[in-house]
Every structure is written in C-alpha cells, then in structure tokens.
Image (cartoon, grey):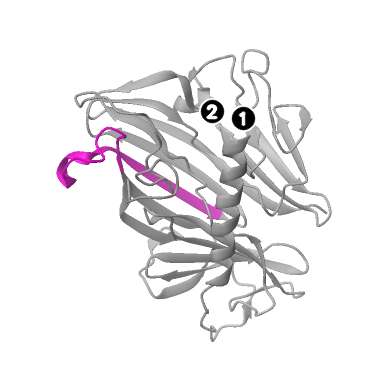
C-alpha cells in the first residue's frame, strides 16, 4: 500500500511536469482533406498521427522519447475540437490532453545475464532507470527507429496523408546484473517493437532477441496508462467481468481465455481496449504461474498483462520470442 501510494505520487508529479512543458506545434499549410484516413508528421525523434476520433474531435497520437532511458514509444494523446467531417492537420490551442506521457506503455524487464554474478533483481528498460524505478542513469536505449507511411519510408521533417502508419523501434536492454559493466557488455537483449497505426487502432508486434544467455524473470508486454479512462475496468474473453480500479481478471487456471482489458470513462464516453494474441508464442502466458491473473490493474493508474511471471523464461544467445497485441482508442456512440 505504501509503495503504491509513493508510486502514485511519483507518476502524478511526472505527469504535471510533462503538462507544463508541452511543445509548441508549427501550423501546417494544409487545413483539411478527405483524401485519406489519417495524417502523419515525422519530426526528429517524434512522430504525430492524426485521425478523426468522433464527430466533434480529432485525435492526435504522439510517439516520442520518454523517461530516463529516452525510449521511443507512445507519448501524449490529444483531443482537438473539430466539428468538420475531415481532419485538421494543425493542432488547435483548445486541444485537450486525454493522456499524458509520464510512464511506459510497453513493459520493462526483470532480466539477468546467466554468465554474470547475481544481484538484486529489479526492472530495466522502459522508463526504469538504474535504481529500478524511474530514477538513476539509463538502463536501455533506442538504437534506431524507422517511420513508414503506406509502405514507404517517411524521413524526418516530412508529413503526409496516409492510410497506414508504421513505427519500428529497436531498443537495447541491460540486465539487472550487467548495469555496472562497460558499454559493450551491459546489453543482454534486443527488443524490436513494431507499431502499425490505423485510425486509433495500434497493432503491436514485439520481437525479443537474446544477446547473451539470459533469464527473463518478469515481463508484462502490453501495459495501459489509464488516466483518461479510469471509471470502469472490464476484463473480457467472450464475456465481460466488471472490476474496480484496483482489480484483476482472476487466476489463469480459472479464467484461461481472458485476452483483453477495456478501461472506460463513462462520463465522456472514451474507452481504451488492450489485448494480446493468446495463440501466438508469449501471448499463451505459458511462463506465468497459473494461480496469477492474466491481466491486472493497480490503483495508481496502470493495467498489465502477465507475460512472464512465476516461471522463468530461459534464452540462449540468438534465441527469439514474440508477442502480439495492441490498443484501440474509441469513443462510445
């Protein structure tokens, strides 16, 4: 309880800081069009994707570097007033922030190099620094990324209309027992995250490649940041299970088919759905103790899928594992 309260305070402070340093966006010469479904802007180390969210709003999805590791991932999410049927490609001063960039949407790791002396386990990667939380020096870095629109690379400082947008990010992750080693020895896995974005649906493919003989002890894969949605939490397979803000989907042995979570804002009609593909590699949750829930929500405002927890995933150098899932951001009719 004390740890959760401290974490809630920490995340709140980070969110407030993020709110205070919002960037000023250049106005586009293009106002509106109905030629395509969405619009993409690629800046240095930042991508913005705009689509029609509802009759009265456009949604702006930011992908940007965040946290102590400066990992490229999902950032701020804006709702910009627009009562026209076509999107606007400049961000209105009256835009509202639905979700702030203040924590990671894709999971860090508890991972160690099997050839090195053991140390106290803690998270590395994502937004987690040397101290295991969001502080200390970096424990990961984005080695490279690529932006693609309708199958064609989109260079920095370019923008265009498109039907599909892709962002491919390659991250290098340290182990909790390699953080003090020289630069050429500390990275134990390569994580490739492929985002495919179409009109508020974000499909995610993750490839995990071992750079050493490693043991992954904890990994959540797909996570949600619930600040803009957190009235109701529902866990679902073919049925819906209502939960409180701090809740879970039930033990995997009792609820083996839970593959998604939906967080709803009942007042404004916003909802966020996250899912995993349970028929594809790590999505089967074979490395999760069956007494643990498949999905759970913490009171400080995040939800998690258990992907590796309670059963260690051992990987030899060069081994690869995969996870598929995604998000859907919509407004109820």
Helix, strand, or loop for circle 1?
A: strand
Q: Position of residue 325 (x, y in %)?
A: 54, 38
Give the quadrant of residue 123.
top left
Give the farthest residue toward the front.
Answer: 2
Q: Which mark is residue 241?
A: none
Q: Position of residue 62 (x, y in %)?
A: 52, 62
Could you tell me how far apart the alpha carbons at marks 1 and 2 are, in whole angstroms? 6 Å
Is 219 positioned to the left or the right of 90 in the image? Answer: left
Give the farthest residue toward the bottom.
Answer: 29
The structure residue drawn at horizontal position 53% and vertical position 55%, both measured from the top left corner, is: 102
The structure residue drawn at horizontal position 57% and vertical position 35%, both measured from the top left corner, is: 304
Q: Position of residue 165 (x, y in %)?
A: 49, 58
Answer above or below: position of 63 versus 261: below
Looking at the figure, which quarter contains the C terminus? bottom right
Q: Are marks 1 and 2 in contact (CB under 8 Å)?
A: yes
Residue in front for this viewpoint, 255 or 20: 20
Is 33 positioned to the left or the right of 26 in the image? Answer: right
Q: Bounds of the magenta span?
A: 173-197
Residue indicated by mark 1: 295
Looking at the figure, which quarter contains the N terminus? top right
Examine the rendering and report whether any part of residue 118 can be seen: yes
Structural crowding at the residue carrying mark 2, measured as other residues with C-alpha within 10 Å and reported as few (<14), some (14–19) or many (≥20): many
């Amino acid at each position: 309880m004390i740890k959760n309260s401290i974490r809630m305070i920490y995340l709140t402070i980070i969110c407030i800081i993020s709110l205070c340093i919002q960037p000023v966006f250049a106005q586009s010469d293009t106002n509106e069009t109905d030629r395509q479904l969405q619009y993409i802007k690629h800046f240095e180390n930042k991508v913005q994707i705009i689509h029609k969210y509802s009759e009265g709003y456009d949604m702006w999805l930011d992908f940007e570097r965040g946290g102590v590791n400066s990992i490229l991932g999902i950032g701020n999410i804006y709702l910009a007033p627009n009562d026209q049927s076509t999107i606007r490609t400049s961000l209105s001063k009256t835009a509202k922030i639905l979700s702030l960039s203040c924590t990671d949407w894709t999971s860090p790791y508890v991972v160690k190099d099997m050839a090195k002396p053991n140390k106290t386990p803690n998270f590395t990667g994502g937004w987690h620094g040397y101290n295991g939380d969001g502080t200390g020096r970096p424990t990961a870095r984005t080695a490279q990324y690529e932006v693609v629109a309708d199958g064609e690379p989109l260079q920095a400082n370019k923008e265009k209309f498109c039907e599909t947008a892709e962002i491919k990010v390659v991250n290098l992750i340290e182990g909790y027992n390699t953080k003090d080693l020289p630069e050429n020895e500390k990275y134990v896995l390569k994580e490739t995250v492929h985002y495919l974005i179409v009109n508020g649906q974000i499909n995610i493919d993750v490839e995990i490649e071992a750079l050493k003989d490693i043991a992954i002890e904890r990994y959540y894969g797909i996570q949600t940041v619930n600040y803009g949605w957190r009235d109701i939490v529902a866990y679902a397979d073919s049925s819906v299970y209502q939960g409180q803000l701090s809740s879970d989907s039930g033990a995997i042995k009792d609820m083996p088919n839970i593959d998604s979570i939906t967080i709803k804002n009942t007042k404004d009609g916003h909802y966020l759905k996250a899912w995993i593909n349970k028929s594809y590699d790590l999505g089967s949750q074979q490395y999760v103790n069956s007494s643990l829930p498949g999905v759970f929500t913490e009171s400080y405002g995040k939800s998690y899928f258990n992907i590796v927890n309670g059963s260690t995933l051992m990987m030899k150098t060069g081994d690869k594992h995969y996870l598929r899932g995604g998000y859907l951001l919509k407004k109820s009719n």
